[in-house]
Image (tube, rainbow, N blue to C red):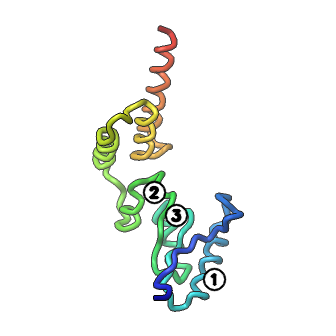
Amino acid sequence: GGIHWVIHHYRTVSEEYRDLPRQEAVRRLQIVGEELKTIPFFANGDIVSPGDAELYRAETLCSGIAVGRGILNDPFLLRRLRTGETVDPGLKQKFLHLLTSGIPGKRGEHFYLECVKMAYGADSPEFCAALTEQKNRRVGKSRE
């Protein structure tokens, strides 16, 4: 049936996860768009904010955006890309509750920390508080 569309990540396998200048990513994606001509392609690579997605849309001939690892650090990234809205803290709390209550047998401290990090982000006050709380519990247990 031929090629109907392509998802293209701008880094090569040998470059692994190395940072490249954003303009180099755009340049590579522009080349792909020019080469594919009439075949729709979706830009991929280090899209972690609406600004990243908008840059790719504005500067390349891409038909859309394909999000990869960015969603691991921000489960609301697709929503933010689509609407441009910030996420309501209540929705994050609901998401955290669903994560921590919906998987039986996985309720250890490490799992909880990963869920808080996923819901709020690694740099959030909520994650820092959960991490501090876990450290304080460990210190308390070691003193007993």
As displayed, is residue 76 above or below residue 113?
below
What residue occupies the far front of the structure in this picture? 1
Mark 3–mark 1 Cα distance, whole angstroms, equals: 19 Å
As displayed, is residue 41 above or below residue 102?
below
Q: Quadrant of residue 98?
A: top left
Q: Earlier in the sequence, mark 3 or mark 1?
A: 1
Pick whichever, 113 or 87, lies toward us. 113
Pick whichever, 47 or 109, lies toward us. 109
User: Is 52 positioned to the left or the right of 85 in the image?
Assistant: right
Q: Which residue is mark 3?
A: 47
Mark 3–mark 2 Cα distance, whole angstroms, equals: 9 Å
Mark 2–mark 1 Cα distance, whole angstroms, equals: 26 Å
Amino acid type of disc 1?
Answer: Ile
What residue occupies the far top of the structure in this picture? 144
- Residue occupying the point 50% across, 58% down: 70
**Dot 2, crowdedness within 10 Å: few (<14), some or many (≥20)?**
some
Amino acid type of disc 3?
Answer: Ile
Label 1: element kind: helix
